[in-house]
């Protein structure tokens, strides 16, 4: 499996939005609108609904710098799990990565870090990179438990992982109170959490892995706040929800990382 050094990454999580034609239009708009020289060495990942992955991977087949991710996968390879999609299936349509542990999956589908760990193993086994999401709720931030919560999520999720496996893991810190609310974490809040996450990775896997792991910030990233967030040394990019549904906004966020 190809190791991924610490990279600048801007990822768009389209969530359960856009019908087929709209997904294709958005992917085409990115393909046409993105100018390589303004992207710098930023890697772009888009995560359309799983039904739309294949036509989009076909569309982007010869486009370096834009990868495609699924938003979830099942932990088993195959079997009687009606309605589910396996990592193997996702890989078979040329997706590159999968987002796992998003707070919406934790909240609405009861996903725990133990389950997320199994899903991550399935993804890595099928040569998909993982974007692992973590983050505290508002009450946890208010009671000053945010580091304990996020540290706990990471320690549980990566308990049985090796430094080698971590080369294909990207972490996304997404404070739940900042997702879809228009309320962004301040650069200081995000930067300090990213620094803390890196220290937990160092404790678990050593300094080289901690240094090499990309940590993205997610939660109301917009064209207007992206440059400030991305300027922080510990913020390696963003995981963007709402603003990734508009090609112009998403492109401006990508350029904020590249520029
Ligand atoms: P918003 O950018 O809409 O706040 O969503 C963030 C997110 O959940 C990305 O995974």
Image (tube, rainbow, N blue to C red):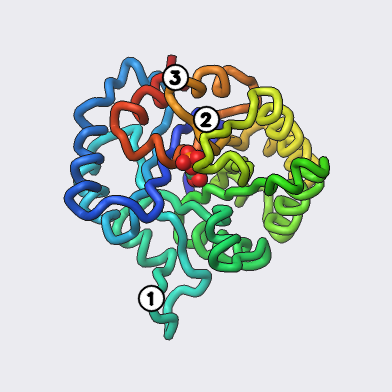
Label 3 sits on a secondary structure element that is helix
**Residue 185 in the image, given as x and y percentages of width and height:** 63, 31
Mark 1 to mark 2 CA distance (whole Å): 32 Å
Give the Cα distance between marks 3 and 1.
38 Å
Residue bearing mark 3: 256
Q: Does 131 sit left or right of 96 as displayed?
A: right
Name which residue lies at 29% across and 59% down: 93
Q: Position of residue 182 (x, y in %)?
A: 52, 34
Residue 208 placement (x, y as % from top left): 70, 34
User: Does residue 147 show up?
Assistant: no
CA neighbours of label 1 inside 10 A, class few (<14), some (14 to 19), many (20+): few
The answer to whether the residue bearing label 2 lies less than 8 angstroms from the nearest atom of ligand 1 is: no
Residue 33 visible somewhere in the drawing: yes
According to the picture, the residue beneath numbered tag 1 turns out to be 83
Asked if residue 152 lies left or right of residue 119, the reply is right
Instruction: Tell me what residue is drawn at x 77 percent, y 41 percent.
Output: 142
At x 49% / y 31%, what residue is drawn? 221
Residue picked out by circle 2: 237
Q: Nearer the viewer, residue 232 or 209?
A: 232
Where disc 1 sits, the SS reads loop
């Amino acid at each position: 499996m190809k190791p991924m050094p610490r990279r600048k990454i801007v990822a768009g999580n389209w969530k359960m939005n856009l019908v087929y034609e709209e997904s294709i239009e958005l992917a085409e708009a990115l393909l046409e609108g993105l100018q390589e020289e303004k992207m710098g060495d930023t890697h772009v990942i888009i995560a359309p609904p799983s039904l739309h992955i294949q036509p989009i991977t076909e569309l982007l087949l010869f486009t370096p710098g834009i990868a495609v991710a699924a938003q979830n996968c099942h932990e088993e390879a195959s079997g009687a799990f009606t309605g589910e999609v396996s990592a193997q299936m996702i890989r078979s349509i040329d997706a590159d990565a999968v987002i796992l542990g998003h707070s919406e999956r934790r909240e609405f589908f009861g996903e725990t870090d133990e389950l997320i760990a199994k899903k991550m193993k399935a993804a890595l086994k099928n040569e998909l990179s993982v974007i692992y999401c973590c983050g505290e709720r508002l009450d946890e931030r208010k009671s000053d438990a945010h580091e304990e919560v996020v540290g706990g999520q990471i320690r549980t999720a990566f308990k049985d992982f090796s430094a080698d496996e971590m080369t294909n893991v990207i972490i996304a810190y997404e404070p739940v109170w900042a997702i879809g609310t228009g309320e962004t974490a301040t650069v200081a809040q995000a930067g300090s959490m990213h620094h803390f996450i890196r220290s937990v990775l160092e404790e678990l896997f050593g300094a080289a892995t901690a240094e090499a792991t990309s940590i993205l910030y997610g939660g109301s990233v917009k064209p207007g706040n992206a440059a400030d967030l991305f300027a922080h040394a510990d913020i390696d990019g963003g995981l963007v929800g709402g603003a990734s549904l508009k090609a112009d906004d998403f492109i401006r966020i990508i350029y904020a990382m590249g520029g």
